[in-house]
Amino acid sequence: MERSRGITFACDGTARVGTCGQDGEAARLAPAVLHVADDGVGIPVDDRDDIFERGYSTARDGTGLGLRIAAQIADAHGWEIRVTDSDDGGARFDVTGVDSPE
């Protein structure tokens, strides 16, 4: 079962943040998947191995720190983060290994 909340940012587009997992007893036994998805231009497959590296940015004035920090937070908690395509054509980031709240 997927639960999402839409968040509209000041920039053009919409991002969805939610969890995927099961309800009830199954949720207690299996880790949840947190996701953030948007309806932007997405991330080319050829770039996906590089986006979590320090300094990677497609913006002229970008620092290249945002996704690196997200990856470090995930790693510090024993989680994994990966990027795929969202249902709306943009990017989707899945964070796995997150324990479900009790």
Image (tube, helix red, strand yellow):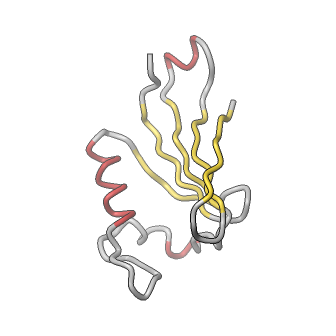
Q: Is residue 90 left or right of residue 63?
A: right
x and y, in percent, of residue 86 in the image: 67, 57
Residue in the picture at 37% in, 65% down: 66
Residue in the picture at 52% in, 41% down: 34
Residue in the picture at 43% in, 35% down: 97
The residue closer to the viewer here, 15 or 81, is 15
Quadrant holding the N terminus: top right
Above or below residue 88? Residue 23 is above
Count of numbered tags: 0
The residue closer to the viewer here, 46 or 34, is 34
- Pick out the residue farthest to the right: 88
- Pick out the residue farthest to the front: 10
- Pick out the residue farthest to the top: 25
- Pick out the residue farthest to the left: 76
Quadrant holding the C terminus: top left
Above or below residue 71? Residue 4 is above
x and y, in percent, of residue 40 in the image: 65, 69
The quarter of the picture where residue 14 lies is bottom right
x and y, in percent, of residue 31 in the image: 48, 28
Q: Is residue 5 left or right of residue 78?
A: right
Q: Is residue 68 left or right of residue 87?
A: left
The residue closer to the viewer here, 81 or 2, is 2
Above or below residue 3? Residue 35 is below
Residue in the picture at 37% in, 41% down: 79
